[in-house]
Image (cartoon, grey):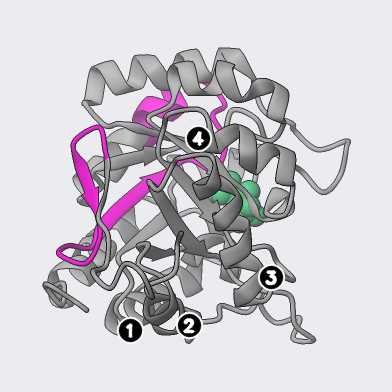
């Protein structure tokens, strides 16, 4: 279903009117985790000023350590909905458990499945049946074949509104949190009709790498970027070291401006 064999035209997925696909480069930005209404609104305004048309923010956080901040749950979803009202930015947020899909879908405009759940087949089937666009991150040890098969689980439930997100894979190299597999972007675009975006924040895990990796992603033909921003990253409850701050946002806007989309990429 996700292969280009029977669907040679590359697809555009529309999230509450915002397109992600070959005719544009869509910027999704916002805080890694929703912490407070003020922090979320400030981050959303920063994102919007940098050219973002979709707001990211985690209410359910899949943390490696059970002692780390796990997210605000439904309270976080309510904050996201309020910030959507104030800014007009549709919401992309993660769901980590099949039992929460209906709840998260009642607030979200796009459901995110993260790297740790990329082969949680019950969750993939549940998001496939939820009637909302899905952003499927690549499992941190998933081959491209495994990633596309995960997308197939979503598609099988009748939902082809799937955006694939390359977010780095685990390699032997510890200098970055993950190794951004930049070649995955054109490889997957040749194999699948689905849009492919890049997460330069979770791949590098370092603020200083976000702009270079964003440039690389746009230059190689990614259909969008998903970027962490935070008004006060030193106080962030999750992944502060990779969040862009106000001073970086002009540079991020310039990445989008200086690398105009390769319109109609095939
Ligand atoms: C995230 O985007 O909030 C996240 C946890 O990303 P990943 O699943 O890629 O680690």
Relative to 122, residue 224 above or below? below
Q: Which residue is mark 4?
A: 93
Q: In terms of depth relative to the viewer, which is nearer, 153 or 237?
A: 153
Inspect the magenta stretch and tell me whether residue 25 lies in it: yes
Counting other residues with Cα less than 10 Å from the Cα at mark 4, is it few (<14), some (14-19), or many (20 or more)?
A: many
* Tag 3 near tag 1, CB within 8 Å: no
Q: Which residue is mark 3?
A: 177
Inspect the magenta stretch and tell me whether residue 32 lies in it: yes
Q: Quadrant of residue 187?
A: bottom left
- Residue 176 placement, left or right of 226: right
- Residue 128 placement, left or right of 172: left
Q: Cα distance, mark 1 to mark 2?
A: 8 Å
Q: Cα distance, mark 4 to mark 3?
A: 22 Å
Q: Cα distance, mark 2 to mark 4?
A: 24 Å
Please report the bounds of the magenta region as a residue range.
15-43
Relative to 250, residue 239 above or below? above
**In the structure shown, which secondary structural element does the residue marked by tag 2 occupy?**
loop
Dot placed on the residue nearer the N-terminal end, 3 or 1: 3
**In the structure shown, which secondary structural element does the residue marked by tag 3 occupy?**
loop
Dot placed on the residue nearer the N-terminal end, 2 or 3: 3
Q: Which mark is residue 67?
A: none
Q: Which residue is mark 1?
A: 220
Counting other residues with Cα less than 10 Å from the Cα at mark 2, is it few (<14), some (14-19), or many (20 or more)?
A: some
């Amino acid at each position: 279903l996700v292969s280009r064999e029977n669907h040679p035209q590359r697809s555009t997925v529309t999230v509450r009117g915002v397109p992600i696909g070959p005719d544009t480069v869509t910027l999704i930005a916002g805080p890694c985790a929703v912490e407070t209404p003020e922090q979320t609104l400030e981050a959303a305004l920063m994102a919007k000023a940098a050219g973002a048309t979709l707001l990211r923010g985690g209410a359910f956080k899949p943390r490696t350590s059970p002692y780390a901040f796990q997210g605000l749950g439904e309270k976080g979803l309510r904050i996201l909905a309020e910030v959507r009202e104030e800014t007009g930015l549709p919401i992309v947020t993660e769901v980590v458990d099949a039992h929460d899909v209906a709840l998260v879908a009642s607030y979200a405009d796009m459901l995110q499945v993260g790297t740790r759940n990329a082969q949680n087949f019950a969750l993939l089937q549940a998001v496939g049946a939820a009637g909302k666009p899905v952003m499927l991150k690549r499992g941190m040890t998933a081959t491209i074949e495994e990633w596309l098969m995960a997308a197939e689980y979503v598609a099988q439930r009748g939902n082809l509104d799937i955006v694939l997100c390359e977010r780095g894979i685990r390699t032997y190299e510890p200098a970055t949190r993950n190794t951004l597999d930049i070649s995955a972007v054109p490889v997957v675009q040749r194999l699948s009709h689905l849009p492919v975006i890049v997460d330069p924040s979770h791949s590098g895990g370092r603020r200083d790498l976000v702009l270079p990796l964003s440039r690389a992603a746009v230059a190689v033909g990614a259909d969008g970027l998903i970027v962490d921003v935070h008004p006060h990253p030193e106080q962030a409850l999750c992944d502060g070291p990779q969040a862009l701050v106000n001073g970086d946002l002009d540079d991020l806007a310039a990445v989008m401006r200086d690398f105009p989309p390769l319109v109609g990429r095939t």
